[in-house]
Image (tube, helix red, strand yellow):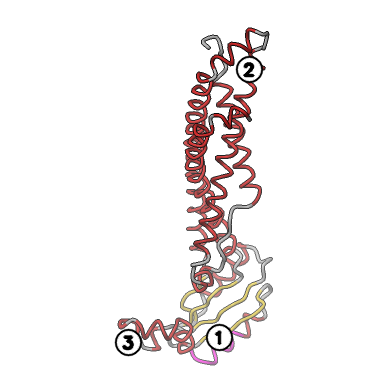
Amino acid sequence: MRGLLREWRLHALSICSLVVAFACLGAALLAVVNLDVLEQRWAHAGRASVYLKDNANQRDIEALHDALLQVPHIVGVRYVSSAEARVEFGQRELENHGELAGLPVDAFPSSLEIDIAQDLTDADLADIVAKMRELPSVDDVETYRTWTDRLAKLVRGGVMASALLTIVVLGAVFAVVGSTMRLALQRRRTEVEVLRLVGATDDFVRKPFVLEGTFEGGAGALGAVGLLAALFFLVRGHVDAELAGLVGIEPTFLPWFVALGMVALGAMLGAVAALLSVRTLGSV
């Protein structure tokens, strides 16, 4: 504690550098967490759209509607006409854009919106979709699986990027903490020499530096988590609620175990870096 207080400027500069490094890692993890939540939300949306052909008559539509209700795992079917689809797309948006305002009602296909039970497997859903596409009144069936697959690829890419950032952060922690501890060791050269003259072992001399490195690494990671939290809640307060409704989720912060893991990782890396930097005291 005396060493930290006496050389607080040196340690504060080191902690600030670590905050920047861990903030980059935390931002990548934050993006991965939200993409994963969005993927899970869309993968279990429990919804599909059956787009009908323009020449589909009302009798065929009603027959398809009643047949779908008899299919296991389909809990609801709602018919949406072309006019209703146009209104759901947003009358205000159509009026604000000249090109879209001129679109006729026929530009929006009628559809049957299906509510699917959560326990329906992907294989069973694919089988149902294949059978529906063969019906003469059906133009196409959208299960939104394509978007889920794209999000899965983004999540995998984010995980790989986070792994690379972890390596970069590891190098930054070793460089910053190691340099700080070596400089602190040189500044306390006289103190260390006195301790060794009165019989202090090398392990006894190293322990304060290792504890300081642990504190620096943990404080840097904790500061990064706090900075990310402040920025996250500040930005989330200005996010339009309609955007959250569009993607289907509210942005979420890092889970507590991820934030705690970052702090533990920072403390551990700081301890190892400090130990390696003062492993030999013969030159002091």
Question: Compared to 103, does 233 lie above or below?
Answer: above
Distance between the Cα atoms at labels 3 and 2?
80 Å
CB contact under 8 Å: marks 2 and 1:
no
Q: Amino acid at mark 2?
A: Val
Other-residue count near label 2 (Cα within 10 Å), few / some / many at <14 / 14–19 / ≥20: some
Q: Amino acid at mark 3?
A: Gly
Outermost residue, bottom side: 58
Q: What quarter of the picture does the N terminus occupy?
A: top right
Image location of residue 283, percent across then percent down: 51, 10
Question: Compared to 194, does 117 lie above or below?
Answer: below
Image location of residue 154, percent across then percent down: 48, 53
Front residue of this view, candidates 47 and 157: 157
Question: Compared to 203, does 35 lie above or below?
Answer: below
Distance between the Cα atoms at labels 1 and 3?
24 Å
Q: Which mark is residue 57?
A: none
Residue matched to label 3: 102
Q: Please tell me in which quadrant of the rendered image residue 98 appears.
A: bottom left
Q: Is residue 63 magenta?
A: yes
Q: Could you tell me which secondary element the residue under label 1 belongs to?
A: strand
Image location of residue 193, percent across then percent down: 58, 11
Residue 97 falls left or right of residue 89: left
Residue matched to label 1: 79
Distance between the Cα atoms at labels 2 and 1?
78 Å
Front residue of this view, candidates 249 and 102: 249
Other-residue count near label 1 (Cα within 10 Å), few / some / many at <14 / 14–19 / ≥20: some
Q: Amino acid at mark 1?
A: Tyr
Residue matched to label 2: 205
Query: Most prominent secondary structure in the magenta stretch?
Result: helix
Does label 2 or label 1 sit earlier along the sequence?
A: 1
Q: Which residues are magenta?
A: 56-65
Residue at position x 59%, y 52% from top? Answer: 254
Residue at position x 55%, y 92% from top? Answer: 59
